[in-house]
Each structure stands twice: as C-alpha cells, then as structure tokens.
Amino acid sequence: AWSNAARESDKRALWRTLARGGWFLACRIAVQQQDRATISTWLEDTQATPHAIIQFNGPQSAQMVYTHLACGLAACDTNVPSHTLTPPGFCRDLSLALMGQPLRQAERALSMTVLLVDTARNEGVVATLTLELLPSGSGEFYPAPELAFLRDDDFRQAEDNAHAVLAPTSFTDQHHDVRWRLQRRDNKPLTSLFGPSLGAAFALGIGKLCAEEPLLPS
C-alpha cells in the first residue's frame, strides 16, 4: 500500500490508519503467530520501505513504532523480560496488550470530566480522563497503549510537564507509575490528541492522587 501511495496526502492518510490501531494490530498478529522474523526485519531494515514508513511522521512517532516492535519481539520470546525495555512501565503494559492479556492492575484510580475539541465538527466533546496508580513502577507517567500514537508534540509536552509534578512525590520514592486513559462520553473512538489543553487536568489529577493517604512500598 505504501509503494502505491504516490502523493504526500496518500501517505499521510495511510499513516493515520497505522496510528489509529494499525501498528498495534500488526504487532499483535505477529505475536500471536510467533512471527519473530517479520518483527526483526522491521526493526533492523534501515534501507527499504519499512524504514520509510516508520520515519514518515517524525522521530517521536518513529520511536514509538520501534518500541512497539521491541515489545512485540519480547512478547514472542519469554527470555526477553519486558521490564528490561525502555520505558519499562509502558513497555510492560504494551507487551501484555500485544499478548492479549490484561494490563497491570491499578491500586487505585481517579476519573475526571474533561472537554476535548472535535476539529472535524468544530465542537466540544465531553470525555473521561482516568489516572491509575500502578505498583512496582519507577515514577513513569504514560498513556494506555491504544492512545500512544494519537498524541502530537504539544500534547506530549503537557504530559512531560505533568510528569514533573509527579517526580517529587512520595509515589516516585515508593516505586509507582501513573497510567492515564481517555474515553469520549459518546463512545466514539479518539482519532487524535493535540495541544496542551489537558496539561492542567493531568497535573490536577496527579495532585489528587498524591493527596490520598500514603502507600506502603510495593
């Protein structure tokens, strides 16, 4: 399909399809079929079409593709523990998801109502932001795997700023992670997450988690 995408707009449309679940599905199928060879080819081939596809949307998106491939390879090989991959918390969840298993269980969760902008309809969309406190972590703040490719640079920066709020808390000292997920109230799928508008909600949510009673180290 990529070789037939002659125009830039065609390639961008194909990338959007990959970002909205295509990369995850391809890796999950490879894991189910124990197809290490295909995953290894995509990881190692720096000259042919795979490299062009991976690099098309910039370095951050490319790194997320490589993370998916590395987690897929780890899921195919039990001798490669997912916690040795980087970032370890996200990779553990992603590896579990690729194997069709439940994500890490949260010790507690906090849900908040937020307002998103549907640019296609030029209207506000009500959504639920959920922050989940996870044991046996290292102070990470990261999205549920299905949202990983939907974020633009400004949205990622808002995440980084929120992580700065998490870093000095006792949760980091006690080895916890915070995973976030987002769902529209009308149950329509999210197609993109852009801009810094959720930064305040992230920080507020982390602050509320930190205001709870102290946790014993896991």
Image: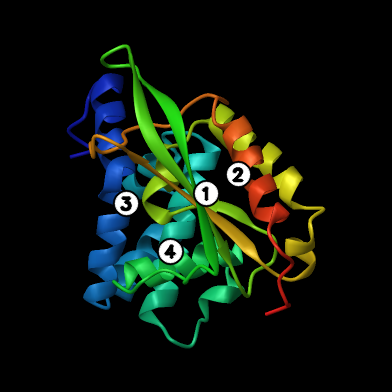
Q: Quadrant of the C terminus?
A: bottom right
Q: On the rendered structure, is 161 left or right of 38? A: right
Q: Which residue is mark 1?
A: 63
Label 2 is placed on what type of residue? Gly
| Callout 3 amino acid | Trp
**Above or below 38: residue 189:** above
Q: Quadrant of the N terminus?
A: top left
Whichever of labels 1 and 3 marks the residue nearer the N terminus, that label is: 3
The answer to whether one can see residue 86 in this image is no
Q: Which residue is mark 4?
A: 94
Mark earlier in primary sequence (2, 1): 1
Mark sitting earlier along the chain (4/3):
3
Image quadrant where residue 157 sits: top right
Q: Dot 2: what SS?
A: helix
Q: Tags 3 and 2 in contact by the CB under 8 Å rule?
A: no
Read off the residue under disc 2: 205
Name the foreground residue: 166 vs 44: 166
Q: Element at badge 3?
A: helix
Q: In the rendering, at what x and y percent does residue 88 appear? A: 59, 67
- Report the Cα–Cα distance between label 3 and label 2: 30 Å
Q: Which residue is mark 3?
A: 23
For the image shown, how many numbered marks are present on the structure? 4
Please tell me whether residue 217 is drawn above or below residue 190 in the rendered image.
below
Q: Compared to 48, does 217 lie above or below?
A: below
Say which residue appears at 32% left-offset and 11% top-offset. Answer: 122
* Upstream in sequence: badge 4 or badge 1: 1
